[in-house]
Image (cartoon, grey):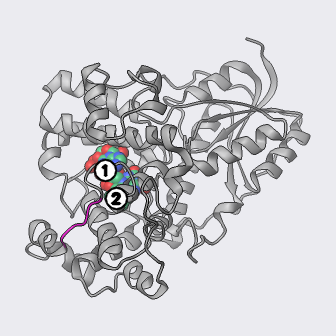
Amino acid sequence: MTAVHTAIYWFRSDLRLRDNPTFIKACKEAEFLLPVYIHSNHLEEEAAWGFPRVGGQRKAFLQESLEDLRTQLRAMGSDLVELSGDILEVFEELRTKLDANQIYCEQIKAPEELEQVAILSHAGFELKSIWQSSMLDPQDLPFKAEDMPDVFTQFRQQVEKHKIRFAKPVDAPVSIPPLPSSHRVQDQATTFDASSSKKSFLGGETSALAHINQYFERRLPDTYKQTRNGLVGMDYSSKFSLWLAGGCCSARLIAKQLAEYELLYGANDGTYWLWFELLWRDYFRFLHFKFGNKLYRSRGLGAAPSNQFNEAKFQQWASGNTGESLIDAGMRELSTTGYLSNRMRQVVASYWIYNMKGDWRAGAAWFESQLIDYDVYSNQGNWLYIAGKGTDPRGGRPFNVAKQTQDHDPDAIYRNMWLK
Ligand SMILES: Cc1cc2nc3c(=O)[nH]c(=O)nc-3n(C[C@H](O)[C@H](O)[C@H](O)COP(=O)(O)OP(=O)(O)OC[C@H]3O[C@@H](n4cnc5c(N)ncnc54)[C@H](O)[C@@H]3O)c2cc1C
């Protein structure tokens, strides 16, 4: 291993120090290290659908997550520099200022993120990246991720047959290389005013760990299977996704804590189901290894293109004014809090696709804009699944709204919360 002089650590969706193998590698190999986060200007542009790609709730949570990361890095003698602009231009400028050509970053297998890396490589940067966002290590799978079974049940059965539970997380670094002292790089990011939006959850690794700990301490995994389709409150589901999405915690860390919990209190339906859901998260990640850009086509993996986009109908759906009370409650919860239960995500997505005959990609883009826990793999995968353009053997999931209302909100408690 040859030590490099100065390197840059590019934080992407891995805003944490614990279980961050790429950051550990950078810390071991670099003599001087500049940790940066870049607010890419392509995300500031309006989405093709006419609304911002990143809404206020997500921005606020991201800003809190960056603040927490900066505090942790400073406590170890380092720092976090926030920059904004075109990714290539930002790195070109850093290269000139720091005489640094090496960039360490986590691997993200989604089209835009892959393209960013390809552009940087093409411009002569040396990128070192490790895949680290799944619970399982793709190397441990009994098949190459590129050859994985299409159907989730077959994927899960193979994983279970080989007794693969999770990959072991790594510790936080014990020390971080000093900042490149001769070249100070000033923060250029315009700080988002987090106070302007109503926040329900606090971003950052510190809050993530506190949240995960209290979830286990209160023994909520035991009841997870019974409560997971709930609509009201913090405890019916884990809410881990909020912190997993930006990488404030890793799925492996949660899975390890879950395994320790099982050793202490015994495995049960609830603990198994929590692992099972985290496996869904991996499944949607690994599908990207296999299908890549195909998952982003209008027809997805199917033959039929998506429905036509209708702006007026979209506004009704997105603003919670369809006249269908369960749907309107869900869409208002989403825009008010930046979160929606899994059950309601399924129901509103189905309503948009099958009842309103909407373009599934516009629905997915609205979720991208609104969800604090927006995750490119899970969002794309779930929307495709419901639209019947992914790998669902049933070919799509239309939900009957009347039945869902009767099953999940018979006393209108949820609807009254959001429709007043
Ligand atoms: C249309 C649609 C869009 C979605 N978009 C996203 C998204 O952008 N980001 C995101 O994290 N999840 C997404 N999901 C999946 C799921 O709804 C959320 O992960 C879950 O509701 C988050 O709440 P929780 O952490 O309390 O979940 P829990 O029920 O406590 O589950 C534990 C963890 O398992 C994983 N998980 C659970 N269900 C799923 C699932 N269906 N797919 C993938 N992972 C799952 C999540 O990481 C979650 O944190 C979407 C689902 C649908 C139907």
Give the amino acid type for the residue marked by disc 1 in the picture.
Asp
Residue at 67% across, 26% down? 26
Residue at 46% across, 83% down? 310
Q: Where is residue 95 in the image (x, y as percent from the top left)?
A: 86, 39
Residue at 91% across, 41% down? 96
Q: Where is residue 84 in the image (x, y as percent from the top left)?
A: 73, 56
Q: Which secondary structure, mark 1?
A: loop
Does 311 appear above or below 261? below
Q: Position of residue 374 (x, y in %)?
A: 46, 56
Q: Is residue 397 covered in magenta?
A: yes
Using the image as rendered, state which of residue 270 and residue 257 is in the foreground: 270
CA gap, disc 2 and disc 1: 6 Å
Q: Mark 2 points at which residue?
A: 388
Residue 262 occupies quadrant: top left
Task: Write down the region rendered in magenta.
Answer: 396-400
Q: Is residue 30 left or right of residue 367?
A: right
Q: In this view, does 364 lie to the left or right of 41?
A: left
Give the class, few, some or many, for how many residues have Cα within 10 Å of label 2's Cα (few <14, many ≥20): many
Residue 198 occupies quadrant: bottom left
Q: Position of residue 177 (x, y in %)?
A: 71, 25
Q: Which label was assigned to residue 392?
A: 1
Q: In this view, does 15 lie to the left or right of 231?
A: right
Residue 247 seen in render: no
Does 243 appear above or below 171? below
Q: In this view, does 384 lie to the left or right of 394?
A: right
Using the image as rendered, state which of residue 285 and residue 371 is in the foreground: 285
Does 79 appear above or below 265? below
